[in-house]
Image: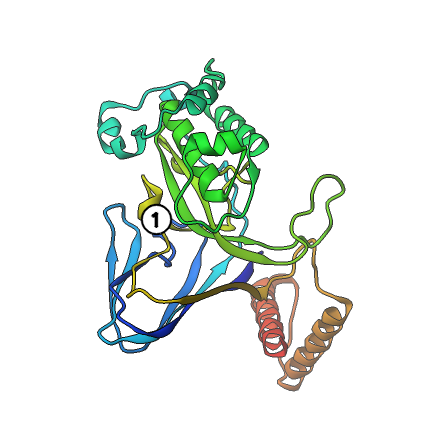
Amino acid sequence: MTIRVALQHKTEYKFDRHVNVAPHILRLRPAPHSRTHIHSYSLKVTPEDHFLNWQQDPFGNFQSRLVFPEKTDTLTFEVEVIADMTVINPFDFFVEKYAENYPFSYDEQLQKELKPYLEITESGPLLKEYAASIPREEMPINDFLVMVNTKLSQDIGYGIRLEPGVQTSDETLELAKGSCRDTSWLLIQLFRHCGLAARFASGYLVQLTSDVKALDGPSGPEEDFTDLHAWCEVFLPGAGWVGLDPTSGLFAGEGHIPLACTPDPVSAAPITGFTDKCETEFSYSNVVTRILEDPRVTKPYSDGDWLDIKALGDAVDEELTAGDVRLTMGGNQRLFLLMTWTQLNGIQRHLVKIN
């Protein structure tokens, strides 16, 4: 059973005068490797007088390049994504025999292909000290990933930071606090210091409120929520890229919809571009709406739904009787099964009409 949602993301810039707008690059379309099933995607740009070219960057991510020939005092990007929140088991993968336990070394060909994701770009004293504190004795690779991800989520507090760019790993460790992109970049550097290929993931995070409150532990968000988010992906031979979210300490699931995954955060920014110098009023919104919910164990049909189903079943029976369609048992089981399927299918169509 699944819940289908509509994710609507709007970013708007209002300028104090008409200005020239340089070409912009948008990375706001779900990446090809997204495990969350995407039904549809749309992008609306204002002003309407613009040129749009879809491209893929060197890492396979979708990006749109926008050119604005005329001056404007407003710039708006509106995205809508329709996606299925079908539960994904984040541990549903296998790894090659040689990579089942940490530590391991990538084979020669993978070493070449993963070179940008193995590059250690930071070696500050706090980062080196923190990396040295991570146990290196042999253990199952899943246990190692869980240990490092959990440790970081406990040691680094979360904070909303509106300044552009990403903190250095030492800054995040010294403050013991950072935004999702700061903590993710720290995790990437830690994995690289441990010999694992890791990359920066920018995307949407969708969190839906639970049908039933948890008996113990947190129950999750009080209401449905979505926003831009960042996490880390690590490459495991045989499994491919596996997502880890150090903000929550969990592995990435169906609520993590990647937009761009790159060796460096600067290449994954959702929007890049510039305008003439001016005063700017900036606003954005992220809204998620449930547009389809299948009945499930935690949220089954209501009593009213069952009464509607019974009424429709009786109506179908009346139609069959009026048409002198007779259902029999015994040797004619094939006809019985066929007509039963027809009846259930008819109920389903009527329910769709009611809903």
| Foreground residue among 176 and 120 | 176
Residue 10 visible: no
Seen at 27% across and 34% down, the residue is 116
| Foreground residue among 267 and 251 | 267
Q: Quick one: which residue is furthest to the bottom in this view?
A: 322
Seen at 53% across and 31% down, the residue is 152
Residue 194 point in image, percent of width and height? 39, 22
| Foreground residue among 247 and 167 | 167
**The N terminus lies in which quarter of the figure?**
bottom right
Secondary structure of the residue carrying tag 1 is helix
Residue 170 point in image, percent of width and height? 44, 29
Q: Quick one: which residue is furthest to the top in this view?
A: 137
Residue 249: quadrant of the picture: top right
Q: How many marks?
A: 1
Seen at 38% across and 41% down, the residue is 200
Residue 282: quadrant of the picture: bottom left
Residue 162 visible: yes
In this rendering, the answer to whether 349 lies above or below 226 is: below
Seen at 71% across and 64% down, the residue is 301
**The C terminus lies in which quarter of the figure?**
bottom right
Residue at image mark 1: 268
- Is disc 1 surrounded by few (<14), some (14 to 19) or many (20+) residues within 10 Å? many
In this rendering, the answer to whether 300 lies above or below 144 is: below
Q: Is residue 251 left or right of residue 43?
A: right
Residue 147 point in image, percent of width and height? 53, 26
Q: Amino acid at mark 1?
A: Ala
